[in-house]
Amino acid sequence: MQIARLSKKALLKLISGDVAEDGICVIKFYSNGCHLCHALRDTYAEVAGEYEDLHFFAFNVQDDPKISKVLKFDGVPNISMFKIKKGKKTQIKKITEPEEPHKTTWYTAQDIRNFIEKER
């Protein structure tokens, strides 16, 4: 599964449910200045390749500095799952912080898989 970069406008549409069809999206929130975010890229892509029925995206928080407050997360990297129903407010779940963060990627592939399986 390919990972598409989301614009601020597209992200706001997902949040509001302004979409053509229902679906589940996994979104990695990142920042250009975050070394953990960059290191997580291949791990996130690996997991995305394992799920045909989900949509994977990445959003640069520098495109909307207020988004972390809107979505109530403290920093990046952050991974969230959006359960979207057309015309309805999107249900958003955030990955929990790992008890022992990976020193170079923060989350492991297994952390992301466990989150997806628990929340889908």
Image: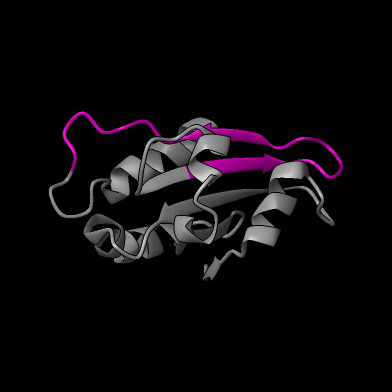
Say which residue appears at 46% left-offset and 59% top-offset.
62
> In x, y percent, where is residue 66?
53, 45
Q: Measuring 59% from the left and 64% from the top, which residue is drawn there?
A: 6
> Is 82 part of what is drawn in magenta?
yes
The magenta segment: 80-101
In the rendered image, which quarter is residue 101 located in? Answer: top left
**Does 89 sit above or below residue 26?**
above
Decide which of 88, 47 is in the foreground and name it.
Answer: 88
For residue 34, above or below residue 94: below
Q: Residue at x 65, y 54 (%)?
A: 11
Look at the picture and state if 96 lies above or below 45. Answer: above
Q: Where 85 sits versus 52, above or below?
A: above
Can the viewer see residue 120? no
Q: Residue at x 45, y 52 (%)?
A: 29
Whether residue 15 is visible: yes
Question: On the image, which quarter does residue 96 sit in?
Answer: top left
Q: Quadrant of residue 49?
A: bottom left
- Please check the rendered image and state whether residue 73 is part of the magenta-colored stretch, yes or no: no
Position of residue 76 in the picture relative to residue 12 (left or right): left
